[in-house]
Image (cartoon, grey):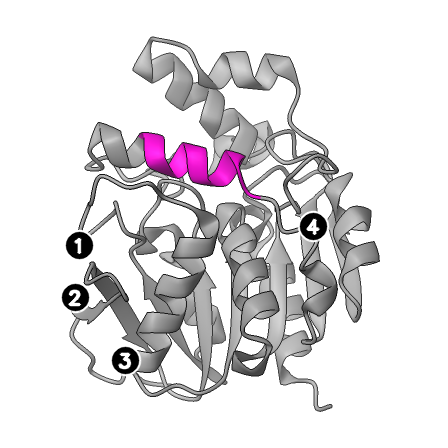
Amino acid sequence: MTDTGHHPHAIAHAQDGTALSYQRRGDGYPLVLLAGQANNHHWWDGIREDFHTTHSTLTLDYRGTGDSDKPQGPYSTQQFAEDVIAVLDHLDIERADVYGTSMGGRVAQWVAARHPGRVRRLVLGCTSPGGPYAVERDTSVRRALAQTDPEAARQALTDLMYSPAWLTDHPGPYTTLGDPDMPPHARRGHLVASNKHDAWDVLPLIGAPTLILHGEHDRLTPPDNVPLLAARIPHTRTHLFPGARHAYFEECRTEAGALVGAFLDERP
């Protein structure tokens, strides 16, 4: 499929007037791709093209990232979800498939639960329900990410995202390690939004068929969250990628892309 020719930095506006930059590529049924915490649409670079045989892909820069406005906040995953709906409304897209990874999976939960008529099929990757029932990363992971040396913290994040074998063959650069141009207040806001996510009570409201994907060795968001999500969301199936860490969608691109594509193409 070919690019639809949309401008790379088109703008929609949230309900509060915040400018939201979005990017639409390809032809076909719309697929919304939602990135992880403190990341912009480049999270999906080199992956979104895999879906263009059947779908057009729609990404956005969360408020606080990329070419979107960067208000002081507060920020929340519920608010990010309403921003997604604002972009869909701007484009007159009544219904779409939604694929969210990491914090994007948290945002996708709210989109699907609060606006069930807008989501045809849902894919949740390397994510959790949040709240008191979620299985959180262990203390050693938190300490590694909180190091005051930026390069050490970045290396720790890289090791959490990818397996050593994959890193050896893929020296980077990596587009999943955060938007480098985010102001500090927005970075803090994204951290708080992700940490305070709790969709436990609304997960049963998700009516869309749902595919839950996770790396078997993910320490950033432990895979023990998979059965928790599957038990709360009515129509689910799950898949673990052996040996993969948080960024399974990149490390296991061929297998993951095929699984997602087949799931999205299923007929009711």
Residue 205, located in which quarter of the rendered image?
Answer: bottom right
Q: Tag on residue 9?
A: 2
**What kind of residue is marked 3?**
His
Q: Earlier in the sequence, mark 3 or mark 4?
A: 3
Horizontal and vertical percent for residue 180? 24, 35
Q: Is mark 2 on a helix, strand or loop?
A: loop
Q: How far apart are marks 4 and 1 (CA)?
A: 32 Å
Q: Residues within 10 Å of mark 4 (few under 14, many from 20)?
A: some
Find out whether the residues at labels 4 and 1 contact each other: C-beta distance under 8 Å.
Answer: no
Q: Is mark 1 on a helix, strand or loop?
A: loop
Q: Give the range drawn in magenta.
A: 188-197
**What kind of residue is marked 1?**
Asp
Horizontal and vertical percent for residue 226? 76, 48
**Can you say which quadrant of the picture contains the N terminus?**
bottom left
Judge whether residue 190 is colored magenta. yes
Q: Distance between the residues labelled 3 and 1?
A: 17 Å
* Mark whose residue sits in front, 2 or 4: 4
Q: Is mark 4 on a helix, strand or loop?
A: loop
Horizontal and vertical percent for residue 92? 33, 88
The residue wearing badge 3 is 90
The residue wearing badge 1 is 67
Residue 121, located in which quarter of the rendered image?
Answer: bottom right
The residue wearing badge 4 is 200
* Mark whose residue sits in front, 3 or 2: 3
Q: Earlier in the sequence, mark 2 or mark 4?
A: 2
Residue 176, located in which quarter of the rendered image?
Answer: top left
Q: Distance between the residues labelled 1 and 2?
A: 7 Å
Q: Is the magenta stretch mostly helix, strand or loop?
A: helix
**What kind of residue is marked 2?**
His
Find out whether the residues at labels 2 and 4 contact each other: C-beta distance under 8 Å.
Answer: no
